[in-house]
Image: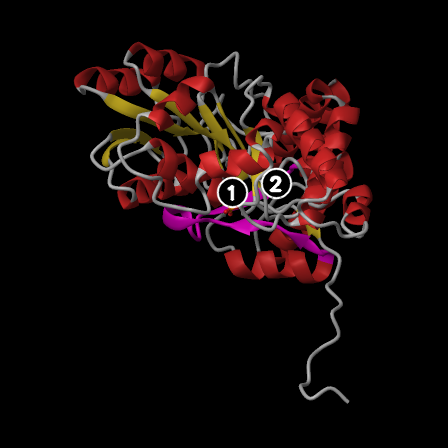
Amino acid sequence: MPEMSYQELKPPRRILLGPGPSNIHPRVQQAMTEPLLGHMDPYFFTVMDDIMKLLRFLFRTENELTFPISATGSAGMEASFANFLERGDTAVIGVNGFFGERMVNNALRYGADVVQLNAEWGRIIEPEVIEAVLKSRKQVKLLALVHAETSTGVLQPLTEASQLAKQCGALFLVDAVTSLGGQELAVDDWGIDICYSGSQKCISCPPGLAPFTANQTALDTLKTRTCNVPSFYLDLSLLAKYWLANGGRTYHHTAPACMFYALHEALALIAEEGLEARIQRHLRHGAALHAGLEAMGLTLHAQPGHRLSTLTTVRIPSNVDDLRVRQRLLNEFGIEIGGGLGALKGQVWRIGLMGHSSTEENVLLFLSALEKLLVEEGYSLEAGAGVSAATRNLKKK
Ligand SMILES: Cc1ncc(COP(=O)(O)O)c(C=O)c1O
């Protein structure tokens, strides 16, 4: 008999339609059970080489420094500020949601002088606002924006912001945690200097890795640093010595091998599907969900014309119990969705259609489950309207 009592590990199967993680493909699950290798094994280095190649394809970049950091998306964010900012540098940061706020929190911890570009939670940061602030400041080191704000469902336009950053000599940093692999993103063509993501969203790999890329312009600024990067674990120059063959493959940390296998397989699946086809799939299912929710008389929270297809925010009708609906979705249908974050807590639901979770069946199942629960909450709607509108929308293309 074991000395301690514990339950048998038997997690239930869920349909993951929250803000992440998304469901993973059986091939990704299988990859994690492959034989464990040491982090300095020659075969393991070939897996790492493939991952870098596939990530360059996904980020649409030629950047040599393109690899996953061994930690969640927040580590990609923190690595950006830890490496590219020094005490007293000016960082201009877009704040129109929870993750913009988290960026500010990070930049302040690394001693930056932070200028916030504020917008309502649910709207984009307008290019004119970015321009006015950049032009009013001398020596801005970095402009940072969240491409896909997971707390609000807003897709931030990037190309104009990128040009504005270039004009004032600032680095352009983009959080692509909820966009990479699901929304269009082109790091090189859009002039993004630094970009990070998370493995668990549109890539459909378990959480635990933060794909990261930085170009030569960004790396050149590392050479002019006056002090060491304050984080050992996130020091990109040290990480590059392990990841890049020309860096000597020097030990830095014990790489989480099974996670690398999973990412390798998830990226291979993306390459097989094709990037354009994958983005179109996300657009199709996102549009069908939006049509279905609106046909049920619900209100989408994000600014029209700037809505993500990977993450939808919908306002919770008054007199409907937020938590009860989410718990019933989970218990009776096995569907996870997210509640509101920060300022939107209790006001919106967040429905993710990311990666392997972005399917026609999931859209229709979710809409019919939600209809049943809303009716039982006393909300009146036309029976079947959501599913019919989504089905019509799916037929359009
Ligand atoms: C836009 C955005 N940035 C950063 C993060 C942080 O990523 P993680 O939770 O993987 O650390 C998230 C997580 O949801 C996110 O949505």
In the foreground, 227 or 182: 227
Q: Is the C terminus in the top left, top right, bottom left or bottom right quadrant?
A: top right
Q: Residue at image x 39%, y 21%?
A: 220
Residue 134 in the figure: left or right of residue 203: left
- Specify start and end residues of the magenta stretch as a single range: 333-354
Q: Is residue 340 magenta?
A: yes
Q: Residues within 10 Å of mark 2 (few under 14, many from 20)?
A: many
Whether 158 is drawn above or below 31: the answer is above
Out of 43 and 87, give the one closest to the viewer. Answer: 43
The residue at 31%/39% (across/down) is 107
Comparing 317 with 345, the one in front is 345
Q: What amino acid is at disc 1?
A: Gly
Q: Is residue 363 visible?
A: no
Under circle 2, the secondary element is loop
Q: In this figure, which residue is indicated by the disc labeled 1?
A: 73
Which residue is labeled 2 in the image? 199
Relative to 202, does residue 224 appear above or below in the rendering? above
Based on the displayed image, in which of its 4 quarters is residue 248 positioned? top right
Q: Residue at x 28, y 15 (%)?
A: 131
Disc 1 secondary structure class: helix
Question: Is the CB atom of the residue marked by disc 1 within 8 angstroms of ligand 1's nearest atom?
Answer: yes
At 60% from the left and 19% from the top, the residue drawn is 60
